[in-house]
Image: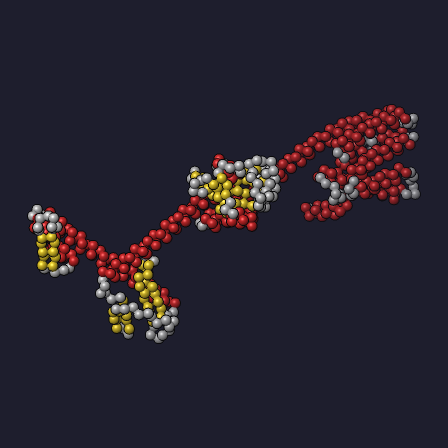
């Protein structure tokens, strides 16, 4: 059933569809009804003519009606369907009055006048409320004129059609006005719904883009990359924005310094070290002073905007404060070449984006500071490790510099000879906390370089050797520290056990000899004091 209805509608559409220049739901609907009624009149009239030809004398009435219907149909498919509607309605009404005035048979007159309400009914389909009222007015006055001017028409013949026309005119007029009112309300609501739907779609698109920008912001840790990606995404994703930039406060918080800007203009501004004073007469100056968003929708008349010679086409500007943890970091500036490009409803969404950017900036700064601290710690560790190994070598001057294994024979090395650079020797640095403390050189018996798997194994061996060497060094240092602590402990105990000056000097000489590993120790007082000295021979 649905397919049959759709096929029938598709078949009728080429015959009744209005001209493309007719705009609006109601004008097109009235034009469509005009085409349908005109075709209906033509469809009904043609069989009557064919059947009645030769037996009935219709006179010019039927032919005039067919002509009026044909012209109305042609006008319904043209850019002027309203003229065709008036032609059809008033033409049928005038034709009915003319037919009634030419008849002499009372029954024929009554029958003709019985069709007088028909044009009023048709006017409700093809004319607006005003056209229906005009048609009703003409119908009522036409009946009165017929009664006054045509002698063959009596008042009792006009009375019933006149009452019917008046009643139908009142009903049709009221219905037409109520329908117009309801249609206006529906159209107004439809427009509001479409506008609201469009606004929702725009807001959703803006939210999606803002979410994309926020995701990109949260995924970047390096500050420079973060700022560059943010301003570029704002210009790329929002069609109304042609320039975006980020200002950050300097250490003194006296100036907002441009840190990132889009396009060739941005590169020039950065090269010029562009900055604006906090509190200056500018959008950035206002934002960095008050900590609230500033919107300028017409830069030609708003004194807050400070025109930049490199951005002369800016007609609207919005700046948002970058606040993280209650601290003002700077401002996000967005510019458009279209006046009134920004709305108050845009501020919360973009402020959320600015807050995300501010948090990301703070995190990026903390990350960079942590990276710098880590690099300083690593550098200090390397320095301390290098100094520790240097002191270890100085404390053990007779220790071998290394060992060499050849065919299972391990020999100490008293000097470091450069390794043969034949491409087959694998040099593996021995690193401890980033500091290279030695080298493990490996050369295969076959003379071929080791494969990747063997290289990985040797690399792991080198790492463990380096850790073992440094652990041994630290252990030796710890043992020496323990020995020193023991010497100091014994010395303190012995010194506290006596008050005899000679005994104290003997103890000092003995412990000094033991600490230095010598066979003799000597200690004495200065000549300015008593003549006391002690000597230890072990």
At a point 80% along the width and 35% down the height, the residue shown is 86
The part of the image, by quadrant, that contains residue 89 is top right
Image spot of residue 215 (x, y percent): 49, 47
Residue extending farthest to the front is 528
Image spot of residue 129 (x, y percent): 75, 32
Residue extending farthest to the bottom is 446
The part of the image, by quadrant, that contains residue 84 is top right
Q: Is residue 185 above or below residue 415?
A: above
10 with respect to 447 (left or right): right
382 with respect to 276 (left or right): left
Viewer-side residue, 225 vs 453: 225
At a point 22% along the width and 55% down the height, the residue shown is 478
Image spot of residue 335 (x, y percent): 56, 43
Viewer-side residue, 127 vs 125: 127
The quarter of the picture where the C terminus appears is: bottom left
Q: How many marks?
A: 0
Whether residue 210 is visible to the viewer of this picture, yes or no, is: yes
378 with respect to 188 (left or right): left
Whether residue 201 is visible to the viewer of this picture, yes or no, is: no
Task: Give the colour scheme shown.
Answer: secondary structure
At a point 56% along the width and 39% down the height, the residue shown is 306
Image spot of residue 114 (x, y percent): 83, 31
At a point 56% along the width and 50% down the height, the residue shown is 264
222 with respect to 454 (left or right): right
């Amino acid at each position: 059933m649905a397919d049959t209805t759709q096929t029938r509608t598709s078949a009728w559409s080429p015959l009744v569809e209005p001209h493309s220049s007719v705009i609006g739901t109601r004008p097109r609907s009235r034009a469509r009804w005009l085409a349908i009624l005109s075709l209906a009149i033509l469809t009904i009239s043609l069989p009557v003519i064919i059947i009645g030809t030769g037996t009935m004398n219709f006179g010019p009435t039927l032919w005039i009606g067919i002509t009026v219907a044909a012209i109305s149909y042609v006008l319904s498919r043209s850019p002027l369907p309203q003229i065709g509607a008036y032609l059809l309605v008033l033409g049928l009404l005038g034709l009915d009055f003319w037919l009634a005035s030419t008849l002499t048979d009372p029954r024929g007159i009554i029958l003709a006048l019985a069709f007088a309400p028909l044009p009023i009914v048709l006017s409700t389909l093809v004319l607006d409320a005003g056209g229906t009222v005009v048609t009703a007015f003409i119908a009522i006055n036409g009946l009165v004129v017929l009664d006054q001017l045509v002698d063959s028409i009596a008042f009792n013949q006009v009375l019933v059609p006149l009452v019917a026309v008046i009643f139908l005119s009142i009903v049709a007029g009221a219905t037409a006005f109520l329908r117009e009112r309801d249609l206006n309300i529906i159209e107004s609501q439809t427009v509001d719904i479409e506008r609201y739907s469009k606004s929702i779609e725009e807001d959703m698109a803006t939210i999606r883009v803002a979410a994309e920008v926020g995701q990109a912001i949260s995924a970047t840790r390096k500050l420079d990359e973060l700022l560059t990606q943010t301003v570029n995404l704002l210009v790329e994703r929002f069609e109304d924005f042609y320039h975006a930039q980020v200002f950050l406060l300097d250490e003194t918080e006296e100036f907002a310094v441009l840190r990132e800007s889009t396009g060739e203009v941005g590169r020039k501004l950065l090269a010029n070290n562009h900055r604006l004073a906090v509190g200056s007469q500018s959008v950035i100056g206002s934002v960095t002073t008050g900590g609230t968003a500033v919107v300028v929708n017409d830069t030609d008349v708003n004194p807050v905007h400070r025109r930049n010679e490199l951005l002369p086409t800016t007609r609207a500007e919005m700046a948002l404060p970058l606040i993280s943890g209650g601290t003002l970091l700077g401002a996000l500036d967005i510019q458009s070449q279209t006046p009134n490009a920004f709305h108050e409803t845009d501020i919360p969404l973009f402020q959320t984006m600015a807050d995300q950017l501010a948090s990301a900036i703070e995190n990026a700064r903390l990350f960079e500071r942590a990276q710098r601290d880590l690099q300083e710690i690593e550098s200090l560790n390397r320095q301390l490790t290098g100094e520790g190994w240097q002191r270890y070598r100085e404390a053990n001057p007779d220790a071998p510099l290394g060992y060499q294994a050849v065919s299972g024979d391990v020999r100490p090395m008293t000097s470091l000879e450069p390794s043969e650079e034949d491409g087959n020797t694998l040099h593996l640095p021995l690193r401890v906390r980033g500091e290279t403390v030695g080298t493990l050189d490996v050369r295969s018996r076959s003379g071929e370089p080791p494969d990747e798997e063997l290289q990985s194994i040797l690399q792991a061996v080198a790492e463990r050797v380096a850790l073992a060497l440094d652990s041994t060094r630290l252990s030796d240092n710890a043992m020496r520290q323990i020995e020193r602590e023991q010497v100091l402990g014994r010395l303190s105990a012995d010194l506290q056990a006596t008050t005899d000056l000679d005994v104290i000097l003997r103890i000092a000489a003995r412990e000094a000899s033991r600490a230095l590993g010598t066979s003799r120790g000597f200690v004495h007082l200065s000549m300015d004091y008593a003549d006391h000295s002690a000597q230890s021979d072990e």
